[in-house]
Structures are given as structure tokens and as C-alpha cells.
Amino acid sequence: MSEDVTPETVPSSDQPLESRGENRSQRPSSAAFKEFMASGWGPRPGVSTEPGPAAPHTAARRERLGAQFPGQRLVIPAGAFKVRSNDTDYRFRPHSAFAHLTGLGVEQEPDAVLVLHPDDEAEGGATHQAVLYVRPPAGRDSEEFFSDARYGEFWVGARPTFDDLETLTGIRTAHLDGLRDALAKDIGPEGVQLVVVSGVDEAVDAVVEEIRAAEDAGESDARLAEALSELRLVKDSHEVEQMREAVAPTIAGFEKIVAELPAAVAHRRGERVIEGTFLGPARLEGNYVGYETIAAAGDHATTLHWTDNDGQVRPGELVLIDAGVEVDSLYTADITRTLPVDGVFTEVQRRVYQAVLDAADAAFAVAVPGAKFRDVHAAAMEVIAARLGEWGLLPVSVEESLSPEGQQHRRWMVHGTSHHLGLDVHDCALARRELYLDATIEPGMVFTIEPGLYFKSDDLLVPEEYRGIGVRIEDDVLVTADGNENLSAALPRDPDEVEAWMARLSGRSA
Ligand code: GLY
Ligand code: MN
Ligand code: MN
């Protein structure tokens, strides 16, 4: 029989849990220390700013948005720091709608909120006055300066002042402390309606909810989110320039990967070698990458979002690399190439690769002004279904497979062929169907063309020779007045050109 054991009560400390994080820093709290820290500094170095190149474009974007919401106050937060774990945050990345309307980019500007105030008397017939509410740096005589690891300039370096941000964005700035009153002004059933991009900044959501509860304001938030997405469907000249800036270092990254393939083969986690080879130069060029790099060798290429990248890279197999540099302005490329690890395609690899390339070329041919966005996918699918039919893989005829009731060919390519691209890798995601999938293609649109074929190693419906082969070819396309431009054309796509390019970069003769 076991004895009853009463656990001893462990006495807890009087120290509240919230202050435990201060245990390690042992910062002095004496008045003498605080006074001493506030003294003896030269002129504040500040942030060097000049008008941002996006400023004229962002003003036009704000006007186009405002015109859709007359009399409504629009609230577009940048977002707040997000905790990664304990007291460390993720690197700050502003919400894309905020970046689009302010021109602010990498690391700019935590907690800031762009408000478009309805204004009948705004200059030039504009419907709204823009104000950027920001948290300015505290003076060196403040405790924040030396004790706040998130905002204190002693910890995070020079932060922009009101003037800096006004110069950079061309938008009037005001203190974040005034945001609540500014949002609440004239709100009411007969007055101004408050519309917010919700889910971006909890503090802003709470303020908006409180103001609305008091005044029963309207429910147009979804319409605003949609309008912000739709505003980016056609890129302006500055955005196209940014896309080119993102594509160029992405292409350079792919070239570096080819040169490093022998090192990847030699490493037990060769996929990580590829990921790291792309990431290093990307980090030098811009913020980071626009999404997690996919470095998928062999059968991993048949897992559409393979981002573990912890596998081996073996000669004789293919490696699928889907990667994009995101530049300071936060525009990202999104490019995929599928390469033979040892520089030469096998016969069956080439057969699958050529089918995907033909599907991509068919999609390019219809991605022109006047066509429907959905035609691009349809053109690619006709080729994919036809090839699968030729190879005897379809359980029905090609026509039956292409019919809405069939679609058996999609087993081997379940994803779409194209998505808009820009500040988000899947840009404009909240646009209405009639302006996206069912829309007519227009000059200035930027989207991907990325057909693929993926035969999983355990797919018993394909002959053994196809199993473990995954191929995707993804390019970034700008629609022009009379056709399209492949922004990523400098990266070889044709299998012979891929082999010659790989031979050149790895020092072998073609
Ligand atoms: N890299 C994600 C995509 O291609 O959509
Ligand atoms: Mn894509
Ligand atoms: Mn991609």
C-alpha cells in the first residue's frame, strides 16, 4: 500500500511575473544615474532623409482610394512589433497597404497609422487629407532613450522625427497620442464614418471599436480591404521599376546557386546550402526574401511548399528552386527554375520539363491586353492535359479531363498558373473575382506564369520512371500596351539553354 504524499508547497516570490525580465539587466535606478544619462550629448545625429521617389505616386494612389470613400475616415495602420518569443520581436514589416500608400518600406514605421480624413475643401479636388500618426523618438533626457529596448535610440539607433517622415513621404505627420481624438472627431450616424483595415494593429482595432460602440459607426471595413487590394492590380511606373529592381538580384541569386551546386551535393543538407546561397546576397540587396525560399531536390520538389530545405541534393536528380528577393520598398520577385543537379537533364526529366515549358509558353501567348486573366491558366492547362494524355496517364480523354466535370489532369498540378505579384508575393489577394480571375488583362499588370508537373514518389498511377520528378518554371510578367514582357527572361528557361548556362557558370564547357 502506498502512503499518501502531500506535495510541499513551494513558497512563491513576492516579485510579480511581469518584472522578472528585469532580473538580468540590473539597470541603476538612482536619480543621479538618470540625470547623468541625460547629460553630455552632442547634437542628435538623426536620420538622413530626402523626399522618397515614391512620394508623387503615393499621393495619386491615396487620391484614387479616397475617391471611392467620400465622407468616410480611412484608417490604415502599419502594424505593431510582433513578439517572436519572450522579449524578442520579429523584424518589423509594415502592412502592404500602408507601404503602398506611404512609400515607406523596410522597418518603417512600427505603430504608425495613416489616416485619410474626409475633407470637402482639400486641394485640387481631392476628397481626403492624409495624416500620418507616428511615435516620434523621445529626447535624450527621457528614460525611454536609454531604457526602452524597443524604441529607445540608445538601443535601436536613430529613429525618424516628424520632419524626417514628412520629408520622406510628403504626408503631414502628427503625434500618435492624438490618434484617438482625431479618429473620434465628428463620428456618428449623421457624421463621419470610420473605416479601418482591421487585424493589423490590435491597439488601433481597440480604439476604433470603442469609438464605434459609442457612436454605432458603419461596417465598411471589408470594402476598404478589397479596395486596397484592387488599387494594386495595375502597377504604376514606380512599382514597375521596383519589380525590375527585385528581379535583377533574384536572377543573380540563381546564378550563385548554380555555382554552389557542387557544395550543395557535398553537404548532408544540400538544400540548406542552396537556401543560404540565395539568402546571403538577397540580404545584401534588400530587406530579405519576399517569402520562404523553396529549395526542393528530388521528390521534395513534388511537395508544393517544401520550405524545410533539410534534404540532400543528389546528382542525377532535379532541384526545384522557388525564390524571390524583396527590395527595400518591399516589392518582391517570385521566380522558379528546376535544374538538373549535375547540369544535364535525363531523357525523362527533359520530357516532363519540356511539357511544363510548352505550357508556360502557351500561357505567355495569351497573357496580353484584352484577354481574360483566367485564359492564361486555361492555355497552360490545355498543354498539360494534352501531354498527360499522350503519355497515357489520364483515365479519360483529354477533352473529358479538360471539362469542368473532369479535371483529372489537375492531380499533377493542383495549383493555379498565375497570381498577381508586387508588395505581396500573392498580391491583390482580396480583390473581387471580377477584377482578378474574371478580369480583362490590362497593361501595367504584373503576375506570374508558373505551370508545373509533380509526380510524387508514391504515386502508383504513373509509371515508375516519372515518380519523384517535380518541375515548375515560374516567370514574372509585365503586361505591356501590346503584349507582355518577361521580367525574368534573363534567366534561361529552354532546357538546352539551361544546360549551357549551367556549364558556363560551373566552369565546364557546354
Ligand atoms: N512562391 C510562391 C508561389 O510561387 O506562388
Ligand atoms: Mn508564384
Ligand atoms: Mn514561386
Image (cartoon, rainbow, N blue to C red):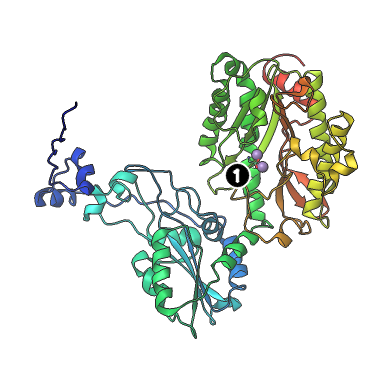
Say which quadrant the N terminus sits in.
Answer: top left
Comparing 464 with 65, the one in front is 464
Kindly identify the residue that appears in the image at 82 percent across and 37 percent down.
384
Q: Is residue 165 left or right of residue 421?
A: left
Residue 325 quadrant:
top right
Q: Kindly tell me whether residue 385 is visible in this rendering.
A: yes
Kindly identify the residue that appears in the image at 45 percent across and 53 percent down.
49
Q: Which residue is mark 1?
A: 332
Q: Secondary structure at mark 1?
A: loop
Q: Residues within 10 Å of mark 1 (few under 14, many from 20)?
A: many
Comparing 96 with 359, the one in front is 359
255 versus 148 height, above or below: above
Rendered location of residue 182, percent (x, y): 40, 74
Rendered location of residue 118, percent (x, y): 52, 77
466 versus 331 height, above or below: above
Kindly identify the residue that appears in the image at 57 percent across and 13 percent down.
266
Q: Kindly tell me whether residue 496 is visible in this rendering.
A: no
Rendered location of residue 405, percent (x, y): 82, 48
Kindly identify the residue that appears in the image at 70 percent across and 50 percent down.
446
Looking at this rendering, what residue extends furthest in the front direction?
Answer: 1
Looking at this rendering, what residue extends furthest in the bottom direction?
Answer: 190
Q: Quarter for ligand 1?
A: top right
Comparing 484 with 316, the one in front is 316
Comparing 445 with 463, the one in front is 463
Residue 316 quadrant:
top right
Q: Is residue 36 left or right of residue 350?
A: left
Q: Amino acid at mark 1?
A: Thr
